[in-house]
Amino acid sequence: MSTAYFMGVDLGSTTAKAVVLDDQAKVLSAHIVQMGAVSRRGMEQAVESALASAGIAQKDINYTIGTGYGRRLVPEVGRTFTEITCHARGVAALFPEANLVIDIGGQDSKVIALDEQGLVDNFAMNDRCASGTGRFYEVLARALECDISEVGALAMKGTKDLEVSTMCATFAETEIISLLAEGADPADVAASVHRAIAHRALGLVAMVGKRDGIIMTGGVAKNPAAVHFLEAALKQKMQVPDDPQIMGAYGAALLALEISSGRQITQYDPEKVQALESKVEATFNPKNRSIPDCISCQK
Ligand code: ADP
């Protein structure tokens, strides 16, 4: 029986995730709640469900770290960290040989380069344009009248490249509907959109520099076609964690354990992470970033 418990809460743009660890860094529970938009209620549900699955109460948690877009709304946190730091931490624990993380969430995509210790070396982020984010796949699923969890399987059946041109999510729906109205096979439409989005993601990878040892995280990594077409575009295989969507919350929970107990799990030095975080946070600030507003429109 563990004597201490640690929690990571990732309040993202579309989902809230909570992970509980015991004092041996074993995952006791993980919970994901779908939200309409960033909501305290969604986060509370994720926390309550994760606590209930772990069979403990809030008072049993020694330390919590909040991450994600809404991280400052997470109550009773010891500290907050950016998703960049938390995804890197989670990946470094599970994949010590990883050199690059591609994290695609509901409204942003990030590429994080890791040094040999798994610490953040460099990163690039697109959070100003829906192109290549989960939102784009949701637009596709809606136009094809299927669930987001089915759109990947449909795309894997596509055989023809329809050379989809619009990469702006605002206009993509119109193009997809036109293709369907012309009689295009929905599977080909799905495959073509996935292929086009994957090629766009290459631009973000190039900003950081392609490396071996790529791990894909975030909810979009649950989409088999998103993984497949990105691998094809990169000409490289990636690894995907069992649940890629909880990687930020898992990394946050690991940092909660390490920082509050002063213990170092694997070769990861929590003091270095804290020192690096201020650098990441400063670059993370949209005012300090040089990434174009809209990657689709930069041609
Ligand atoms: P955020 O942290 O920004 O809220 P997530 O990492 O939770 O985002 O990712 C949300 C995205 O993941 C959704 O927009 C959707 O595209 C994708 N997604 C979530 N679940 C699935 C699934 N079962 N199959 C395919 N895609 C999924």
Image: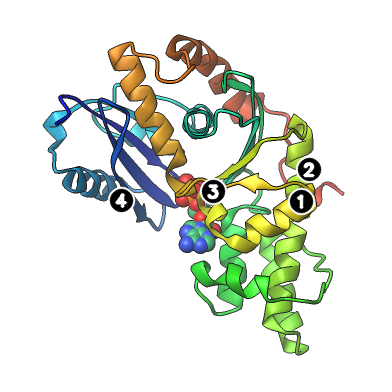
Q: Which residue is mark 4?
A: 42
Q: CA distance from mark 1 to mark 4?
A: 31 Å
Q: Is mark 3 within 8 Å of ligand 1?
A: yes
Q: Amino acid at mark 2?
A: Gly
Q: Residue 203: which disc?
A: 2
Comparing labels 4 and 2, the label whose residue is closer to the camera: 2
Q: Amino acid at mark 1?
A: Arg
Q: CA distance from mark 1 to mark 3?
A: 15 Å
Q: Name which residue lies at 25% across and 43% down.
A: 47
Q: Which of pointers 2 and 3 lies earlier in the amino acid sequence? A: 3
Q: Which of pointers 3 and 4 lies earlier in the amino acid sequence? A: 4
Q: Which residue is mark 1?
A: 200
Q: Which residue is mark 3?
A: 105
Q: Name which residue lies at 30% across and 51% down.
A: 42
Residue 296 appears in the picture as rendered: no
Q: CA distance from mark 3 to mark 4?
A: 16 Å
Comparing labels 3 and 4, the label whose residue is closer to the camera: 3
Residue 189: x %, y % from top left = 72, 75
Q: Quadrant of the N terminus?
A: top left
* Crowd class of label 2 (few under 14; some 14 to 19; many from 20; radius 10 Å): few
Quadrant of the rendered image containing residue 220: bottom right
Q: Name which residue lies at 14% across and 30% down.
A: 60
Q: Which of pointers 1 and 3 lies earlier in the amino acid sequence? A: 3
